[in-house]
Amino acid sequence: MKLSKIYDPREMNSYQFVAATGLVMTIVANLILLLIGKSIESFSALYLCWFVFFGAGTLANLNSKPSDQDHHHHH
């Protein structure tokens, strides 16, 4: 098991990359909401969604063969 598939963006699959990007964007949006004094009911549920999406992508990535993803690279 190659643990760098979990934290290294160059080895993440598309699901992990989208989830990580979504998490960053959700954090930024949350900070903006805090700065302007607004709140959205159930906004924190997005964090759970990104975690589940990242987890599913991680399982798929860890169970894939190296030849399965030779054409997917994020630089």
Image (cartoon, grey):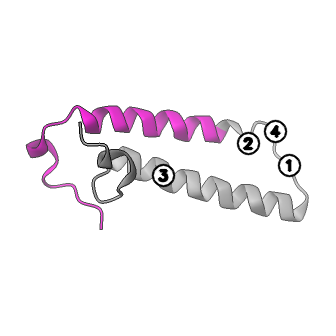
Q: Main secondary structure of the magenta part?
A: helix
Dot 4: few (<14), some (14–19), or many (≥20) neighbours within 10 Å? Answer: few
Is the Cβ of the residue at disc 2 closer than 8 Å to that at disc 4? yes
Q: SS at mark 1?
A: loop
**Mark 3 or 4 closer to N-term?**
3
Q: SS at mark 3?
A: helix
Pick the front one: 42 or 57:
57
The label nearer to you, 1 versus 3, is 3
Query: What residue would you read off at disc 4?
Result: 41
Q: Is residue 12 visible?
A: yes
Is the Cβ of the residue at disc 1 closer than 8 Å to that at disc 4? yes
Q: Which residue is drawn at 85% across and 49% down?
A: 39
Q: Which residue is drawn at 39% across and 46% down?
A: 16
Is the Cβ of the residue at disc 3 closer than 8 Å to that at disc 2? no
Q: Residue 43 carries which label?
A: 2
Give the extent of the magenta segment: 46-75
Give me the C-alpha separation between circle 1 and circle 3. Answer: 23 Å
The label nearer to you, 3 versus 4, is 3
Query: What residue would you read off at disc 3?
Result: 20
Give me the C-alpha separation between circle 3 and circle 2. Answer: 17 Å
Give me the C-alpha separation between circle 2 and circle 1. Answer: 8 Å
